[in-house]
Image: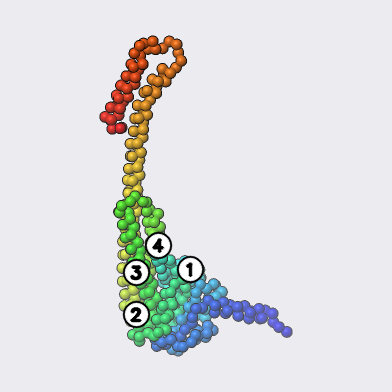
Amino acid sequence: MTDVGAGTGQARGRAQRVGADAAIGDCGLYTRGQRVPGRVPLDRAGDAAQGTDGFVWIGLREPTESDIAEVAAEFALPALAVEDAVHAHQRPKLEIDDDVVFVVLKPVRYVDHVEVVDVTEIAMFLRPHAVVSVRHGEGGVLRQVRAELDAGVPPELDFGPAGVLYRTADRVVDAYEEALGHIDLDVDDIERLVFGPGEDDHAERIYKLKQEVAEFRRAMLPLQRPLERLAAGEVPHVPEAARPYFRDVLDHLLRAVDAIEVIDRQLTDVLQANTARVTTGQSRVALRQNEDMRKISAWAAIALVPTAIAGIYGMNFDHMPELGTRYGYYVVLAVIVGACLTLHRAFRRNRWL
């Protein structure tokens, strides 16, 4: 007789394993700076590096909670950290839970043709003989690091799991500096447009780029404290020989932080200059409009004199002054011309014409 509950549990276990295997990009064993050929099965990954000086590296891409459940159980990963790794949208940080180090990194890529900073996320769990990485979004940082490790690591740079973290952080910070170089070129281009000829309003482009820089800063600035802890030896599984390398990454990060602060200030100044330029242009237009309105009003006032007089004498009354006078017509014309000339001279004197 078949145990329905047991059968259901086995089916659920197989489904869970299939999901985990689908989310795993690679699972490799590294010993003495070299990768052992082949891929390690997930159910043997936890024991693969035990008793050796190596480690196993499991890489997952955008796993669900069910996808990562078996990996978390295999390596006893902290539940809250696993939840953060699955749901992403975390700030760069470093947390220590017993012998598990949890690190979040935020790689960026600047899409130059649309001036957008594309921010992705990497979560890493470090144990004495294991690395579990979780990637969200498109990005080649982890692929590059794995390719570098697969090609072989010099003995003096074989830092175990800390070596994976170092190389990942190094490439992330290098990408920061590369993106800042492209942003700096765009800022120079905006400055040329704002301070060059023409009266176009560039506020929308400046503000959009300033928003992207703000998102960039949120991805980069919080990484400073984790790197300081790694460089100071406050984190387990980081050998003393690796600390200078983390200090080097920290130096690069601080340089990038200074650069992005400068860029942010430049954008603020350019935005203010653009606003002042647009306001000045609008003031010139308003001034010209006022001058035009004064001229129109002056000519309208001059034209009103003959119109008013002609209107009065156009009324059909039998008894009106000057109608019977021999030179009344010429007198009225003289009055009209004199009044118009007087108004014209007055308007010219007041610079309305």
Residue nearest the observer in this picture, 47 or 306:
306
Tag 3's secondary structure? helix
CA separation, marks 3 and 4?
A: 16 Å
Using a 10 Å C-alpha cutoff, classify the residue at mark 1 as few (fewer than 14 neighbours), some (14 to 19) or many (20 or more). some
Which of disc 2 and disc 4 is earlier in sequence? 4
Type of residue at label 4? Glu
Query: In the image, is residue 237 above or below residue 85?
Result: below
**Which residue position holds label 3?**
177
**Which residue position holds label 4?**
115
- The residue sitting at 30% across, 21% down in the picture is 338
- The residue sitting at 57% across, 79% down in the picture is 17
Type of residue at label 2? Ala
CA separation, marks 4 and 2?
A: 36 Å
Judged left or right of residue 312, residue 331 is left
Query: In the image, is residue 241 above or below residue 226?
Result: below
Residue nearest the observer in this picture, 343 or 7:
343
**Which residue position holds label 1?**
88
Type of residue at label 1? Ala
Tag 4's secondary structure? loop
Discs 3, 1 touching: Cβ within 8 Å: no
Using a 10 Å C-alpha cutoff, classify the residue at mark 4 as few (fewer than 14 neighbours), some (14 to 19) or many (20 or more). some
Which of disc 1 and disc 2 is earlier in sequence? 1
Q: Which residue is farthest right?
A: 1
Q: Which label lies toward us, 3 or 4?
A: 4
CA separation, marks 4 and 1?
A: 24 Å
Q: x and y percent of residue 186 in the render?
A: 35, 61
- The residue sitting at 44% across, 17% down in the picture is 315
CA separation, marks 3 and 1?
A: 24 Å
Discs 2, 1 touching: Cβ within 8 Å: no
